Image (spheres, grey):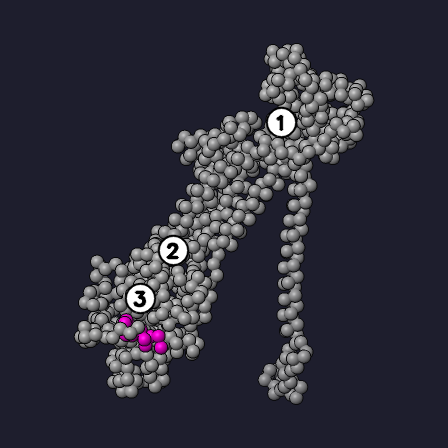
Amino acid sequence: MTDTTLTPPSGKTSAPAPNRITSILELDPLTRKRNAAEARFKLYGIIAIGIGLFFLIALLWAILSNGLGAFSQTFIKVDVPLNQEQIAAAEKSVVKTSKYRAIIVDAFARELAGDKITTDMSAKDMEKLFSSGAAATVRDYVLANPDKIGSTVTFDLIASSRVDGYLKGRVKREDLAEDKNLDAAHLDLADQMQSAGLLEKRFNWAFITGTDASDSRPEQAGIGASMIGSLFMMLVVLFLSLPIGVAASIYLEEFAPQNKFTDLIEVNISNLAAVPSIVFGILGLAVFIQFMHLPQSAPLVGGLVLSLMTLPTIIISTRASLKAVPPSIRDAALGIGASKMQSIFHHVLPLAMPGILTGTIIGLAQALGETAPLLLIGMVGFIASNFPDGVAAGFFSPNSAMPAQIYEWAKRADPAFYERAWGGIIVLLVFLMTMNIIAIILRRRFERRW
Amino acid sequence: MNEMPNFEQAKTMTESKISAKKVQVYYGDTHAIKDVDIEIQPRSVTAFIGPSGCGKSTFLRTLNRMNDTIDICRVEGSIKIDGENIYDPKVDPVQLRAKVGMVFQKPNPFPKSIYDNIAYGPRIHGLARSKSELDEIVASSLQKAGLWEEVKNRLDEPGTGMSGGQQQRLCIARAIAVSPEVILMDEPCSALDPIATAKVEELIDELRENFTIVIVTHSMQQAARVSQRTAFFHLGILVEEGLTQDIFTNPKDKRTQDYITGRFG
């Protein structure tokens, strides 16, 4: 053979190129390769979705299994005789509730005897079965109903977080070695009380409506006050960022001239959406609190900071939905002599409404879950009393917010607070879901057929 | 309707409704329309024809200042309607557009009811003092657009639910409702099938009695069918303008002849 490649094709090599198969009933190698690539790609997609779903389910399972406990609470049924002298003595002492505690334990010991439950536990140890808030419950009742003094009243008193945890399975006998506040006798007693019907597990309204409680009373902590705080903040965010955001987007999208300056603004708005939220927090601290001297921990300030954060989201989505309105609609309105503003407000804006609402709700949802900026402006107020008509009642009074409250609980040592934190997350998610449902309903209402 | 053209109207026939002199249109640096002079006769149909990109639509849109909505667009020269320069700084384009209505290439009814589509213009211009007056305007506009019989029982249904041809006639009715004097139509039939096109053409022919109509069209047959005068645009220049039958049977310019015989375009 010669070394030239230009040898005339022999009979065999003049057949079609090796890749080409003449019948379409047979797959040629290239097609086979393409099909395989396609199948592989589909598989990757399914795997990706599978991983996502797995983590979603794991998350939901974790939230529900850890958090549902917060929605039920164990109560101890005690018939407390409200003895005139004992109460008078208690009201005279310095720490009034401690005397009431003694009254409760007295009554409780008698009740145990009545139910033929024997225990050699001291009164001091017996106290540990009750929440330290139980005494306050009895005292508040006495103060509110002085006419009941002298009679015997049946109270459902909150059990301590340990007894509550034992009934929910969180506190186990194996853990006793590490717990100074509890020994096996407590749990034995709890078992006996349960079979005697003295313990009752009920839905825990106080968790949803109540306030935070101190470190020693996790069984009394509730998310109600911070829910109000979050609600106030969301109102501020909604009423500030929606009108400002929509007005800004309409101006930028429909009226502003296209030049370097508006380009700069546009780029900056997009960048603002990506700024870490803690930066907004420190901005809020510097501007609203240190410069403008607005009150610390107030939902108004929290709302202002979160509005700053939400604005870019709302502006970006509003501009996108304004852009998506076909220009023919603008032409139609202008063509019959509508002014620019009329064409926007009568025709473009209603059509853009579903998109604007979606963006707003996404922005609000983001703001609702935001924790970092709130820490910087002190929206982690410890609200334990005077609720709902006291400190947590207004836009200017100190409050907390749901995510900040959850963060606070997660930080605390007692495992009972851990349960509250998960429970708080459930409430937060329900809040978010409600907002999303409202958004969907509003969107349906505003959506028009083309 | 059965308004007879009276003596007054006959007299104004001789004066042109729109008179454009040395009109230049620029898109940024592009010189899109060069030195266009044209007189448009009242109560007649004038067709603008020409190959794609020749500037006929651009020129049409200068007549009601729809080009104002494009930032980079600049118009020079004078365009007078009834002797008034529409590019005078004192002119509000919104008021002008009530006088010079427009129908677009693609039917673009508002996503509202048929009634509201028609009533919108009269409402924003305050043409009706009461609900019954508004009803009357809606009915008469739909009648003039030949749509009344088809829609009188479903005025509250969305205008977007109608067929393409009906939608376009709805858009014409919407333009009529504000009682303009001139109606500009930018390829009104290009999105319609032949039957709907025939209906719209018939309508244009009827409307000529009361309105001055300027129509941009891609179809030379359509121009021949509906217009009294035709203007041929090419590369931003008005090549030739005259009576439609003259343009189509006896064009003076070679480019016009080439275009109407299908040699380019």
Q: On the image, numbered disc 2 is attached to which residue?
A: A346
Residue A169: percent from left, percent from top: 74, 35
- Residue B209 lies within the magenta run: yes
Q: On the image, numbered disc 3 is attached to which residue?
A: B101
Q: Is residue A263 above or below residue B218?
A: above
Element type at marker 2? helix
Q: Amino acid at mark 2?
A: His
Chain for disc number 3: B
Which quadrant would the N terminus of chain A be assigned to in this image?
bottom right
Q: Amino acid at mark 3?
A: Gly
Residue B146: percent from left, percent from top: 37, 72
* Residue interval drawn in magenta: B202-211
Chain for disc number 1: A
**Is residue A337 visible to us here?**
yes
Mark closer to the observer (1, 3): 3
A324 sits left or right of A195 in the view? left
Chain for disc number 2: A
Q: Dot 1 surroundings within 10 Å: few (below 14), some, or many (20 or more)?
A: some
Mark closer to the observer (1, 2): 2
